[in-house]
Image: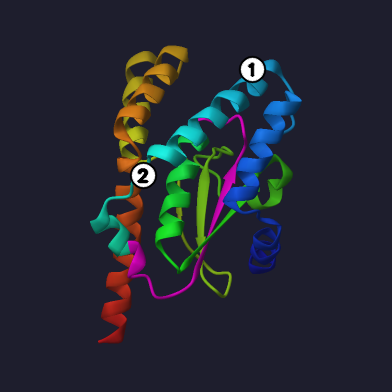
Amino acid sequence: MTNELIKKSIAKGISYTAYVELMNRLVEEESTTGIEQVKQRIDFTKLNTSRIRRLDKTLVIPEPSKQVFRDMKEKQTWLVLIESWCADGAQTIPVLNKIAEASPAIDLKILLRDDNPEFMDLFLTNGTRSIPKLVIVDHNSNVLNTWGPRSQVATNMVLAYKKENGKIDDTFKKSLQVWYNKNKGEAIINDLVNIVEDSLTLEKDFDK
């Protein structure tokens, strides 16, 4: 059942180009993805569209990291659950796209969380439908790994703030976006390099 659901989800996934086009259309329509059509999420969709546009122009994957992704031999689908209003998603999805562009082995597909609850519920984070969520799948629709909703560095920041303040508030959310802008995708890239390097090491050990 799980493999069948994964196959269907991959088939439903859209390309990065199609996702950006969707974001632009939503801005024109003053709308958002997802169940809740509220002003805050509509405003975040507009803001996130600008963030994505900026990252598309400025983001650079370092050459050593690019080489790791180029060294991948087996074809993989990188399936991302996201919504247009998700601030973490806007900072993440352009990074994943740049990585996919660097590697012929990676096929990046995007799914909207609220349209795919059954698939989302296979990949909860601490019991919640946290996004963005990356699901890495092989050519047989087997799940190889998952990542998200944030890099390990950002996750540690969240945990430290929660421990000190009891919850995540607007002050932290603003400071996190400032950190994203300064970090320029480095923490996300490093996490995914580690995931891929671990899998490449396993492949080499298996080939011996």
Which region of the structure is painted magenta?
69-88
State the image coordinates of residue 94 (x, y, percent, origin top left). 47, 43
Q: Is residue 116 left or right of residue 173?
A: right
The residue sitting at the bottom extreme is: 208
Query: Residue 30: x, y in percent?
Result: 73, 23
Contact between labelled residues 1 and 2, with CB atoms less than 8 Å apart:
no
Say above or below: 2 vs 50. below
Amino acid beneath label 1 = Gln
Q: Which residue bears the numbered disc 2?
A: 188
- Residue furthest to the front in view is 57
Q: Which residue is painted at 64% across and 23% down in the image?
A: 41
Query: Is 96 on the left or on the right of 206, as rendered?
Result: right
Q: Which residue is mark 1?
A: 40
Callout 1 environment at 10 Å: few (<14), some (14 to 19), or many (20+)? few
How far from the left and from the top, in percent, is residue 207?
A: 30, 85
The Cα atoms of the two marked residues, 2 and 1, are separated by 26 Å
Helix, strand or loop under label 2: helix
| Quarter residue 127 falls in | top right
Question: Which residue occupies the foreground of this view, 48 or 174?
Answer: 48
Residue at x 23% of width, y 58% of height: 64
Q: Position of residue 168 (x, y in %)?
A: 45, 19
Q: What amino acid is labelled 2 in the image?
A: Ile
Q: Is residue 122 visible?
A: no
For numbered disc 1, what is the local secondary structure? helix
Q: Quadrant of the C terminus?
A: bottom left
Q: Decide: is 57 above or below 157.
A: below
Nearer-N-terminus badge (2/1): 1
Q: Is residue 87 magenta?
A: yes
Q: Is residue 101 magenta?
A: no
